[in-house]
Image (cartoon, helix red, strand yellow):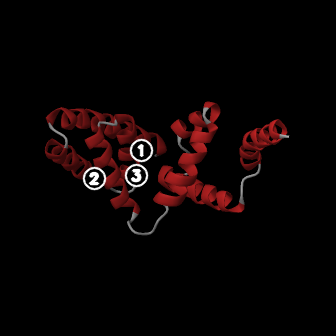
Amino acid sequence: MNRTFIALLCALVLILPLVAIAEPRQEDQSRRERGNKVINKLSGGAGQPVLDAMRQDFPFLADAITDYSLGDVWSREGLDDRTRQLAAVAAFAAQGNLPQLKIHAGYALKLGVTQSELKEIAYLTTVTAGFPRAIDTAQALREAFATHAASTKTAK
């Protein structure tokens, strides 16, 4: 009897998470919808290539980003989109997370943040994270500026 109980308990531990993954709850759906609205707003409906690629091999991670980062956090009303992007760029600059910095600098530019404002973040990074991070930030911003300029030309 003891072995049967343990086997049943092990089976439940293994099966229940699969059931939860198979059928998203209503709450998860609304989080996903909010997250998708945020990414569509930030990208101008172009989607997010990094997130789309991640969905191929790491769907659980892409879903977590969409649901939590975008659906729960990014969709909050405490900050406007422009301020939120400036904060994100500053945080990624201080962390040295250049791929994310470039993505969010591009969103910031689409929202009307100026190159001068983003350059100030690079300068501020000398205080918060040191000159090497500020130099890396400046290089990443140059790439983001060029990408934004190229996409603006093709959109016209």
Q: Which mark's residue is nearer the viewer, 1 or 3?
A: 3
At which x and y percent is residue 24? Answer: 72, 53
Of 98 and 140, nearer the camera is 98
At which x and y percent is residue 152? Answer: 41, 44
Q: Residues within 10 Å of mark 3 (few under 14, many from 20)?
A: some
Q: Are marks 1 and 2 in contact (CB under 8 Å)?
A: no
User: To which quarter of the image does residue 85 belong?
Assistant: bottom left
On the image, numbered disc 3 is attached to which residue? 110
At which x and y percent is residue 50? Answer: 51, 36
Identity of the residue drawn at 34% across and 37% down: 97
Identity of the residue drawn at 18% across and 32% down: 132
User: To which quarter of the image does residue 81 belong?
Assistant: bottom left
Of 75 and 111, nearer the camera is 75
On the image, numbered disc 2 is attached to which residue? 114
Q: Residues within 10 Å of mark 2 (few under 14, many from 20)?
A: few
Q: Secondary structure at mark 1?
A: helix
Q: Eyeballing the image, is 89 above or below 6? A: below
> Could you tell me which quadrant the N terminus lies in?
top right
On the image, numbered disc 1 is attached to which residue? 152
- On screen, residue 51 versus residue 147, left or right, reads right
Q: Eyeballing the image, is 111 above or below 63? A: below
